[in-house]
Image (tube, rainbow, N blue to C red):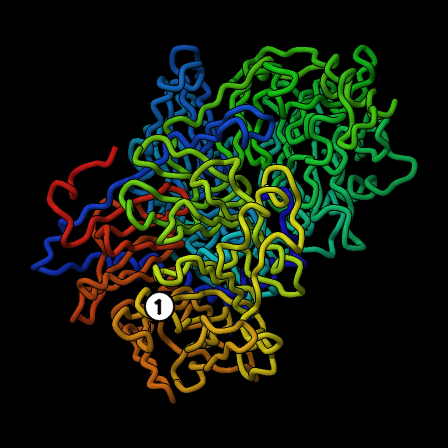
Amino acid sequence: MAEAEGGPFTVAEEKYLNRAWPGDEVPLDASLAAPSVFREVASRHDDDEKMDFNWQPLGPTNAFYPAILGRTGAPYVSSGRITDLAIDPNCGEERCRLWLAAAGGGVWRTDKALSDEPKDFNWKWISGPLGSNAIGSLLVDPNDGSGNTLYVGTGEPNASVDSEAGVGIYKSTDGGDTWTLLPAVATVGAGVFPNFPKGRSVASLAIDPAGAIYVALARGIRGLTASDGGGISTPPPPQNPAPLGLYKSTDGGKTFSRIWNGSTTLRGVIEVRVDPRDGSVVYASAFQVGIWRSDGGAPFAQIFMPTSPAGNTDRTQFALTVKDGHTRIYAGDGSVGRSPPGFFESQVWRADTAEVPAAVLLASQTASPGVPGLWKKLTRSAVADPGYATYNFCTGQCWYDNAVVTPPGHPDTVFVLGSFQYNESFTFTNARAVLRSLTAGEPDPGHNNRTFTDQTFDATSATTPNSIHPDQHAIVFVPGRPGIWFEGSDGGLMRASGRYVDASAQCDSRSNFDGTPLTPDQRITCKRLLSSIPSAFINMNFGLNTIQFQMLSAHPTKPRSSLLGGTQDNGTFAFTGSRVTWKQTGGGDGGFSGYNVARPNFRLRTNFGQHVHGTRKGNDPAGWYHIGGPILFSPEGSYFYMPIIYDPSPKAADTIFAGSQGVWRTQDNGGNPAFLEANCQSLSTGEKPTCGDFVELGGAAGDLTDPARGTRPLGGVSVVARTPSDTNTLWAATGMGRVFISTNADGPAAAVTYHRLDTFAANSPPRFVSGIVVDPHNSFHAWISYGGYSGTVAPTGAEPNKPGHVFEIDYDGVTATWVPIDDGTGPMGDLPVDSIARDDATGDLFVSTDFGVLRQPAGTTHWHMAGSGLPPVEVPYLTLSQSGRVLYAATHGRGGYRLLLRGASDDDRGGDDD
């Protein structure tokens, strides 16, 4: 997530609803069925097609940040979001197996985790047999000393909107070479749930000494599109009881029983741990309700209350260890930071005798004075206080960036993982994203009363050190050597050297951002935090193909060798022919991008919200400038990634259309480039209303989400579409299902008018519109795709839902018809569609889903898998270059892929542009 991440009270509320609308929640049965629906459809193929179209991976396996875009001025190699890590208990210098779970990229393994040479890592993707590459948790069975027994829980629990639901739990007994899906059936009271826990996210796994398996279940979503691929998923209370909670199996995973319902949590259980002192005692935490405990099978009782229980984003993470024969707990808790009222800064706590009765332990949290050995808050807000080290450690993103871990056998060592403190970086801290204590969080009199030290930067340079990515998720340690640790984040994997340096002298030359010297309080805190930092980080991302693309755009004249791709929290990358190295051209959360079809050195890219950048200097990272100011400073909102396109017609090549609540337009690439380069440079200036010259089409009546326009109000513009053959006609749609056409979109902005089309068709769904492609020969003829589920039941009084995900639309200037290409129960089944593309030369249609890409050959009525070789992965966007005869899939976890289409030569089909 980006440093200015929108909170759950801004862009987030619509994220979950885009999938659920017109209901309140994604229907569980439909979500459970979706993977099977895709597999059934994908198994079909035509006799004359022979399925000889092969997807080609484009990488990157070396996602390279140039120094100018590095957070610390140092170059960096990135990979996609890591959700969990596991290490072989027999790790040694010659052979050290490390397993990595990527949010959308599956499970990877290296046998050379301690090598200092990137070429030695030889990362191997080992999750091919898994039904989903969205991974939430990894566990090496603690009862198998060989380290060969591994469990993988699919589905990501982090509360972001792109935290994808899973398809179950897999087990391997050979280190991940082969996998078996646990044939689990779960019971919740009288309810029976086969295929457990399909459709949910496995947040955490644990195994006790007797071999019982514990599974913490949280929510996930389905239906990721390019325009809403970020922010927080905020599900309202479910219409019906859902099987969230903590489950236990005593028969190796054949059957599970729910042993705790998670109390009042709306998001589910996030962590489970077995007491290392007493294997019959189990601890678990859930969003919004803190930490609970069960003693020997007794009902769960609360032992820690959350600081912001009113918010369903409050997340408590914890770690267990044994100190002097007692169970010690470390806990980190927080929600969305210091605002709104009722929410508080994140904090770290410790209890040294946690085995006391639950009620006693819970009461100690608010006791004044505190009770020795019970809950003690280690965090303080005063800068000079030693406890400041963990103050607000996960900022406004504790629902996403929050982990507390202690290495086995080292009870006084604890790590706290959170998010980058941008307002402190290179001033009196190193951004405090990763913190380490060797004294259980207590002041150390021998080291200036430090409590934690800042592990975010290494000591290779005082001015351009290597750094860990801003958003943290997982950490593991070399067994018996806790000074060597592996840390997973949104930017991949880093390893600490195991040697530590006192870099506190750097504090003597540091200042605040305004140039003022550090205050005495800041200086003492700086010296504490920098008194023991890693001597070096080893970047372990080379060879990992796990980047999470939102969208790919193709160069108009070099569509095979020049692409731009926006990625989740890793910026926008440029592909220039190499399937290994893509170079970052812009930072932040990368969203949409595009090329001017007549002057392709003019380009655009977006970050989240209404942040738009333009350039006339191609991929030069220093050439970008802000152009979205008029939209950003308007009162309008937008989806997390605002849809935006360059006009595909050479006659209007300088025109850009962007969708907020209405459609905004610029006809000169965003404004005078000389002015923008001088006043709105992306790397060195903030955004201003004068950065860009977008104007809203339709003037005061331009808001396409306005309730005054009738049914299906609110939301935002989700799609804008044009055809190269018509510079007058524009299509636009909203997330609530409104569809519009304008026939004078190139006219004076205030005079542009729209005709609403969805009201003419009784069968048009009131759901999220995920894509539109316009017929190049008839701009009143288009194909449209929808997200969400046909089976969703609308609330009482709301417009009833309508089946279907792909339709053909005809408009005759007066009325419009929606012809279903799939009625939601027919050829495609009830499968949300994330994107749509059309091969104009053949008439073939392509749609992307959370599991891959489907194709409908022209003249047929059925869908089947589009080619072979694409792993099971969510694909938020498809891009088809008609001139290049190539289809691109932007995958959310396995990088970019391309499929060469009919008309591409055999050499092209098997070749490479490298």
Against 607, is 105 above or below? Answer: above
At 46% from the left and 44% from the top, the residue drawn is: 616
Do we see residue 170 in this rendering? yes
Q: Quadrant of the N terminus?
A: top right
For the residue pair 369 and 382, the one nearer the viewer reads as 382
Total marks shown come to 1
* Residue 732: percent from left, percent from top: 45, 70
* Residue 442: percent from left, percent from top: 79, 22
Q: Which residue is mark 1?
A: 830
Dot 1 amino acid type: Asp
Label 1: element kind:
loop
For the residue pair 886 and 430, the one nearer the viewer reads as 886
Q: Is residue 838 left or right of residue 380?
A: left
* Residue 610: percent from left, percent from top: 58, 56
Q: Is residue 47 left or right of residue 484?
A: left
Do we see residue 163 in this rendering? no
The residue most toward the bottom is 814
**Crowd rating for badge 1 (residues with CA inside 10 Å; few <14, some 14–19, many 20+):** many
At 55% from the left and 51% from the top, the residue drawn is: 672
* Residue 204: percent from left, percent from top: 53, 41
Q: Which picture quadrant has residue 174?
A: top left
At 21% from the left and 52% from the top, the residue drawn is: 885
